[in-house]
Amino acid sequence: MLHGSETWPVRKENVVALQQAEMRMVRWMCGVKLKDRLPSNELRDRLGIDDIVLVLQQNRLRWYGHVLRKDDDDWVKKCMEYEVEGPRPRGRPKRTWTEVVREDCQARKLNKEDAMERCKRRKVIKDVR
């Protein structure tokens, strides 16, 4: 369900749809019906899984750190920093992956320099629950 989620510029409606699908699967695995009105956290604890929003954030931050540690001439890093030329279309710009990652880093109090310290970054990414 989260294949390639490291590069998704998720929006609120995407997150809500993922949470709904995840909870349907969790209830099905636990053999619980929606009518039973059991809290989501309790069902996730039974299965020993984390919230899908947390897993998405961890995946993005892990990939971001990986890309930051690459050489400056690597094509993946160049793609991350690429600016499209030409006039922008009318209306509000779409939410970019970089904006989503910046919000994730602010939420976990990470900066670009932390990417070089893999152990510290990995611990910060995994420990928040």
Image (cartoon, rainbow, N blue to C red):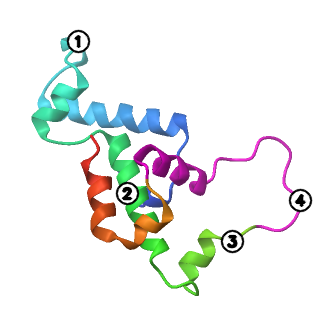
**Amino acid type of the residue tagged 1 in the rendering:** Lys
For residue 19, what is the image quadrant? top left
Amino acid carrying label 4: it is Pro
From this view, report whether residue 51 is shown above or below residue 125: above
Q: Secondary structure at mark 1?
A: helix
Q: CA distance from mark 1 to mark 2?
A: 33 Å
- Three-letter residue code for mark 2: Asn
Q: Is residue 90 magenta?
A: yes
The residue furthest right is 87
Please indicate whether residue 36 sits to the left or right of residue 91 in the image: left
Tell me the residue at 48%/59% (across/down): 111
**Tag 3: residue type?**
Tyr
How much space separates mark 3 and mark 4, taking CA atoms? 15 Å
In the rendered structure, which disc, 3 or 2, sits on the residue that comes first in sequence? 2
The image position of residue 20, as x and y in percent, is: 37, 31
Give the labeled residue for mark 3.
82
Q: Which residue is labeled 2 in the image?
A: 59
Label 3 crowd (10 A; few <14 / some 14-19 / many >=20): few
Residue 4 rendering spot, x and y as whole percentages? 42, 61
Q: Do callouts 1 and 2 mark residues in contact (Cβ within 8 Å)?
A: no
Determine whether, in the image, residue 112 is placed left or right of residue 37.
right
Q: Give how far apart the Cα atoms at labels 2 and 4 are.
A: 32 Å
The answer to whether any part of residue 9 appears in the image is no
Mark 2 and mark 3 in contact (Cβ < 8 Å)?
Answer: no
The residues tagged by marks 1 and 4 sit, at their Cα atoms, a distance apart of: 52 Å
Q: Specify which label sits upstream in the sequence, 3 or 1.
A: 1
Residue 87 tag number: 4
User: Which residue is under mark 1?
Assistant: 35
